[in-house]
Image (cartoon, rainbow, N blue to C red):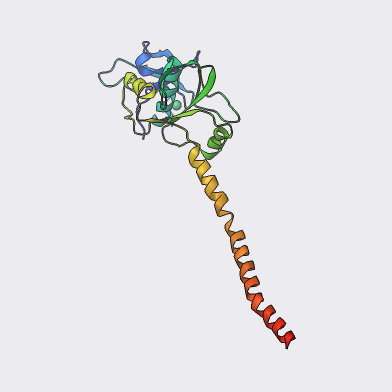
Amino acid sequence: MKGQIIVGVQRQTEAIMPIGTVSLTGLKCDCICYECKGTLEAVLNTTRRKHFRHSNRGNCNPTPETELHLLAKKIILDHNRINIAHKGIVTYADPVTEVWYKDVIPDATIIIDGLPFYIEIVVTNPINSEKYLKYKSDLSPVLVITLSEVDRDLDYEALTDLVLNDRTNRHMLSYADQLIKKVEDDKFSWWPWGILAGLAIWLLNRNIPKDRRIRRRRRF
Ligand SMILES: [Zn+2]
């Protein structure tokens, strides 16, 4: 889905700029496109929805999914309280986004009670298995926030509420399903041995009458 650009990046600070936070119009906003890094103009004096446009019309057509992802990360950076599925609303410190952790880049890392806590924002792509296995290797606490059903035209305040407070769109990354599956896999791997054992028992049982027959013959 394509649409008007509503998120820019401040050229100097590299801060994410939702169009609602921009006050300088046109090139004065000094923003660039998050996708192609091209210069953006802020279109603020419009009777329709405020937006950005590329100053040099090229082929760049940034996706709204990326905008949603960027906005969600900015919201986490700008606040210090979030609803984490199992504990309700907690206070966090030192939020960072896109910082490496064990060969993966969590969307956001926050500190809760002195410990790192990770946040993944799912818009289009679910967490890939490589990332999942890295998290699972030390049972990292990971909150998954799903924004795939979110209306792209949602205003910034409503999106803030969805990212920080909504209870229905989040869950803690579960490692239990995988543990159960592992146990099932282990059980499953016993079946060839079961068949071999069965075969051995059958062969032994088959041989017993033969032995008895031989012994009987010798008696005569
Ligand atoms: Zn662009």
Kindly tell me whether residue 146 is visible in this rendering.
no
Q: Looking at the figure, which quarter contains the C terminus?
A: bottom right
- Residue 72 sits in which quadrant? top left
Would residue 182 appear left or right of 56 to someone viewing this image?
right
Where does residue 187 sit, x and y in percent of width and height? 55, 52
Query: Which quarter of the frame holds ligand 1?
Result: top left
* In the depicted structure, whether residue 29 falls above or below residue 151: above
* In the depicted structure, whether residue 193 falls above or below residue 176: below
Kindly tell me whether residue 191 is visible in this rendering.
yes
- Work out whether residue 115 or residue 38 is closer to the camera in this orientation and state it: 115
- Residue 122 sits in which quadrant? top left
Where does residue 158 sit, x and y in percent of width and height? 32, 21
Where does residue 128 sit, x and y in percent of width and height? 51, 38
- Work out whether residue 209 or residue 158 is closer to the camera in this orientation and state it: 209
- Work out whether residue 186 or residue 103 is closer to the camera in this orientation and state it: 186
Q: Looking at the figure, which quarter contains the N terminus?
A: top left
Q: Residue shown at 28%/18% (left/top)?
A: 46
Q: Residue shown at 73%/85% (left/top)?
A: 219
Where does residue 210 sit, x and y in percent of width and height? 67, 80
